[in-house]
Image: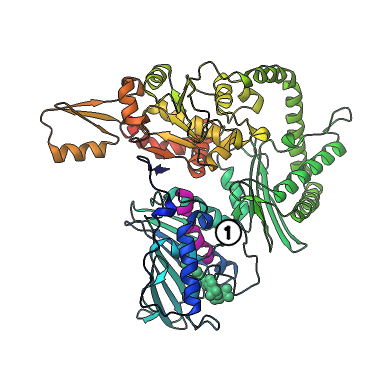
Amino acid sequence: MSPAREGPPQPLTTERADPGPPDPRAPYDESQIQVLEGLEAVRRRPAMYVGSTGPRGLHHLVFEVVDNAVDEALAGACTRIGVTVHPDGSVTVTDDGRGIPVGIHPTAGRPTVEVVMTMLHAGGKFGGGGYKVSGGLHGVGVSVVNALAEWLEVEVHRDGAAWRQRYERGRPVTPLERVAGARPGATGTRVSFKPDAAIFETTDISFDVIAQRLRELAFLNRSLHIVLKDERTGQQLSFRYDGGIVSFVEHLNRSKDVLHPRPIHFSAERDGAEIECALQYNTGYNENIFSFANTIHTTEGGTHETGLKTALTRVINDYARKTGALKDSEPNLGGEDVREGLTAVLSVKLTNPQFEGQTKTKLGNSEVRGVTESVVADKLGQFFEENPPVARKIAEKAVAAARAREAARKARELVRRKTALEVTALPGKLTDCAVRDPAVAELFIVEGDSAGGSAKQGRDRRIQAILPIRGKIINVEKARLDKVLANEEVRALITAIGTGIGDDFDLARARYHKLIVMADADVDGSHIRTLLLTFFYRYMPQLIDAGYVYIAQPPLFRVRRGKEDRYFYTDADLDRYLEQNGRSGVSIQRFKGLGEMNAEQLWETTMNPASRTLLQVNIADAMEAEWIFSTLMGEKVEPRREFIEAHAKDVRNLDTIG
Ligand code: 1YM
């Protein structure tokens, strides 16, 4: 989770970003003027190039450099990629590829590596061939990273020599120099950079966000070895999957009971596009489709995903009819029936991908729909013919889902009618804010009634709404949608948020752009947090994608010295303060729950936008919550026992570490 810096209004990033004075050493020729204008444009409007100046844009810098190394792996020239986060917040990416060319570039008259680092859109446009990314945010080029970095250093090993160059805010500050340290026969590229704090709202690189993407890349690029190190904490992870996306599906299903032992896997090249898919059913009710286009995670779906879904529905309906699993008197299976308990990874590669949607993660190429549909229909149909026992299980599960859906229809109609009535009427327990502008409105989702009371009194009633959640919300892992929707706490939450859910979801209808989960720093609070995150991840992931979901950080301690009160959010901070300032004459209050704080304290420490700290939830956090959840609540005993053993220490300390 990334701390979102808050406080007095900051000037716009575009005004803060100072491109600095021109470098007097730089020769004054036309290509240099172009370079400087290009870099200045990036620093003036960073969001246009990396999406945002928040955590998303920050991490994008790392991914952009990593993508160049992955391209080298796709070209068959690199087997190992390293990513290291250093204590000063800088990042190093290495690969053992050919090394970026260092010879003088024929038109720019400068070393090619310098051209790649300083000219917009220079990266990757030289070679041609392969499936390059265009559109979307990836593929903007490493020069954008350079422009938005306080400093960047590149080192190239090639032809038995080593070369190095340093840049500051995009401008070369040394020429490309030959350096010592070349190892005979070794080739590769090393790029180190420090994101510019004058550009980004936060420069705190999240280990989890990086780890999540690198794991994904390792799955999508079979046998590529990626090593991640965090020198700030000593954490280290190594990814290498010889099974590729089959391993990905097995990983996603690792805590679930599966319907068939091995994922179904196929790939084909058709009409200039490569389609690869792995899928496996589990005994649960949720659908988990991860789609990618040129290794970009298309979280908003798109034509490739539509093609997959259409083919699945058709093939399973055909099979169920043909074998009599579905009776003539019964209607066709619906899309949601054939996707119940489905875990699938779909990876397509094409030459000219078009990315659309709010976060540019929706594949728009219309030709891909038909290609994917025909590949999946052919290959899956063939698999069903050759593996009748697996096909029968899948068809029977879909038929059972359809029958359960039909049986629940009447009950759900009732619920629907009730919900429909409630759409206009906001939930009774919601204490709404005065403003109607969602961009400034905040919803605090508060555990328990007593804390809800303090929050209600302490809030800024203009912009802050309060929704108390009582007890445990429903376990979304073990229930079908209709049962989830019948849960009163869930219904209140959905109505208050206003976006709707599932296929009806519309981000534009969100009534608040900050949804803040405020729960105690104890075991129960952690349970509620996990439940809520799992719920958002399952049914409203777009809210997380949009950066609307936050976790409040209530303090653990109050220290009173004379008339002065200070609050501390961790044991370590309290210890440091007491070491520096002594213990005499202080009284320490330990907050066990939100309910122990009065309204004023709660406002001051946790709710006041000028002084609070919020943790912004990202998809990696939510996926982790979902995994913890399915491990703890799911059917499988073994992963649960392993998890509890591995985390026994943390669980015991939950009361102290939060
Ligand atoms: C740590 C980041 O950028 N590796 C990298 C980049 C390139 C090459 C190899 C490369 C590409 C080609 C030929 C080609 C790039 N080269 C260019 C350009 N790692 C990292 N490794 N030889 C080497 O595409 O033909 C851009 S990126 F333009 F110079 F060819």
Against 415, is 147 above or below?
below
Tell me the magenta residue range.
53-69
Direction left: furthest residue: 584
Against 150, is 644 above or below?
above
Q: Does the magenta stretch include residue 314?
A: no
Against 357, is 273 above or below?
below
Graded by Cα atoms within 10 Å as few (under 14), some (14 to 19) or many (20 or more), the crowding at tag 1 reads: some
Residue at which label 1 appears: 242
Which quadrant holds the C terminus?
top left
Report whether 155 appears left or right of 253: left
Q: Does the magenta stretch include residue 58?
A: yes
Place of residue 471 in the rendered image (x, y in percent of width and height, measured from the top left): 47, 19
SS for dot 1: loop
Where, by quadrant of the figure, is residue 524 drawn? top left
Against 635, is 486 above or below?
above
Place of residue 218 in the rendered image (x, y in percent of width and height, measured from the top left): 54, 57
Where, by quadrant of the figure, is residue 448 drawn? top left
Foreground residue, 71 or 515? Answer: 515
Report whether 326 appears left or right of 51: right
| Whether residue 539 can be seen here | yes
Place of residue 136 in the rendered image (x, y in percent of width and height, measured from the top left): 60, 56
**Residue ID at (43%, 60%):** 148
Where, by quadrant of the figure, is residue 462 drawn? top left
Foreground residue, 511 or 70? Answer: 511
